[in-house]
Image: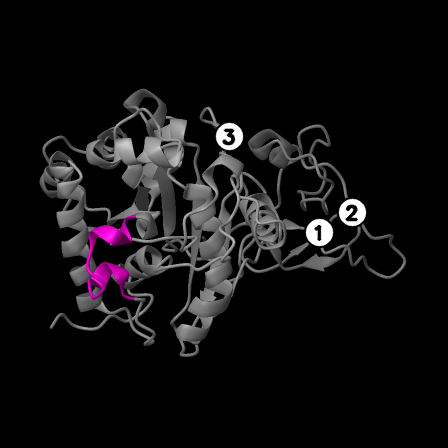
Amino acid sequence: MKKVAFRCSQRGQPGRPPCQDRDDPKRRREFQDSQPVPPAITLPGSDPANPTDLLAAETAVCSDCGGESRIRICPACHSRLPRSLEAGSPLFGLVGLRYSGKTVLLTVLHKQLKGQVARRFDASIITPGGSSGLARDLEFNEYAMLSGEQLPGQTEQSGGEKQEPAVYEWKGSTKGSGTIFSFYDNAGEDVKNEDVVTKQKYLAQVSGVMLLLDPFAFPENRESATTRGVTVAETDPEAALDGITSVLQHKRNRKVKTPLAVVVPKIDAFFDQVPANNPIRRNSPESDVFDEQDSLDVHDNMVSLIERWGGDHLIRQLRANYDNFRVFGVSALGAEPEYGEARVNSRGLLPHRVADPLLWLLAEHRVIPKSAKK
């Protein structure tokens, strides 16, 4: 991005009062967010009823208070932009059917990014926009899960309206090892059929997708879901894949180039179906590189498990339509929750391989190194 908009720093020149927080029409229109914020810097003399943003590269001077600002914002929606944002910064979509556990997974991933993942890769990982939009919601969810052990509710359907993503800035300890990436959390209804998913225009611009498939929604597991009191979407997992493919497949009969991480959450509920030494049950490696062989071992075993669950046609769809996909088995909670009360298990949060899909996507974009296959 060569030129962006700026928000006033509220540090006016001597003798001139600083600007006060006010409603931002663009944020209200795009995100239904009417919270007062420092005003966007506008062109001098522009119409107050329809002001024009002043666009610049590094800094801008507020025409009202005279203060200089380095607070960069998106010209279209006025979301905060990291200082190091570039045109090639990846955008990742997290999508799946209702009840697949997207919000819970993203909440735990948000926590791990700032802690375990940052330590593992000796990186600084922050949300430069602060606690706003999805990042704010994830922090609220984290607090509720840790303090009251309450699971977050279902994501509301967007109906095609824009939602503010959670933006992360990753800075490694070596020069040039940083990037910006962001996530959206869509409602399950947003991806269950082609008519609705095509309204999610951001999906056509993503650098990678994490597609969550509820294991209880596969044919062989629905009876088990009923026995355990697990709520499952009526739609087959193949519907979510069909919807995503319809957006990502730009040309008919051409395989999708966008990397697709197929994520099977709640895998701890199926540990009794795999031996204790199976790669699915192993903990994630702790080295500061992405372990490609470990990931492939998990992939192969997850493919076999999905085929046993009656998902063999879905696997054939993936092979026929995607150049680059990887299957993961993860658990945000690590132990089955109290399904009826939507509460975390009394053992607490015990995440299992939650960061693996994201780390694979980052490795595919060469943000982090990966080891060679053995």
- Residue at the location (51% across, 30% down)? 156
- Rendering coords of residue 302 (x, y %): 19, 51
Nearest-to-viewer mark from 3 and 2: 3
Q: Is residue 151 left or right of residue 329?
A: right
The number of callouts visible is 3
**Residue 4 x/y as whole percent:** 54, 50
Neighbours of disc 2 within 10 Å: few (<14), some (14-19), many (20+): some
Q: Is residue 47 above or below residue 176?
A: above
Question: Is disc 1 placed on a helix, strand or loop?
Answer: loop
Residue to which mark 1 is pinned = 8
| Camera-side residue of 230 and 82 | 230
Can you say whether 26 is above or below 10 in the image?
A: above
Q: Which mark is residue 259?
A: none
Q: Are marks 3 and 1 in contact (CB under 8 Å)?
A: no
Q: Which residues are magenta?
A: 270-282
Q: Residue furthest front?
A: 227
User: x, y (%) of residue 333?
Assistant: 43, 53
Q: Amino acid at mark 2?
A: Asp
In the picture of the structure, the residue carrying the numbered disc 2 is 64
Q: Residues within 10 Å of mark 1 (few under 14, many from 20)?
A: many
Q: Earlier in the sequence, mark 1 or mark 2?
A: 1
Residue furthest to the bottom: 174
Which comes before the other along the chain, label 3 or label 2?
A: 2
Q: Amino acid at mark 1?
A: Cys
Q: Which residue is mark 3?
A: 156
- Residue 312 placed where, x, y %? 11, 38
CA gap, disc 1 to disc 2? 9 Å
Queried whether the magenta region covers residue 273, the answer comes back as: yes
Q: Is residue 163 above or below residue 64?
A: above
The reply to whether dot 3 and dot 2 touch (C-beta < 8 Å) is: no
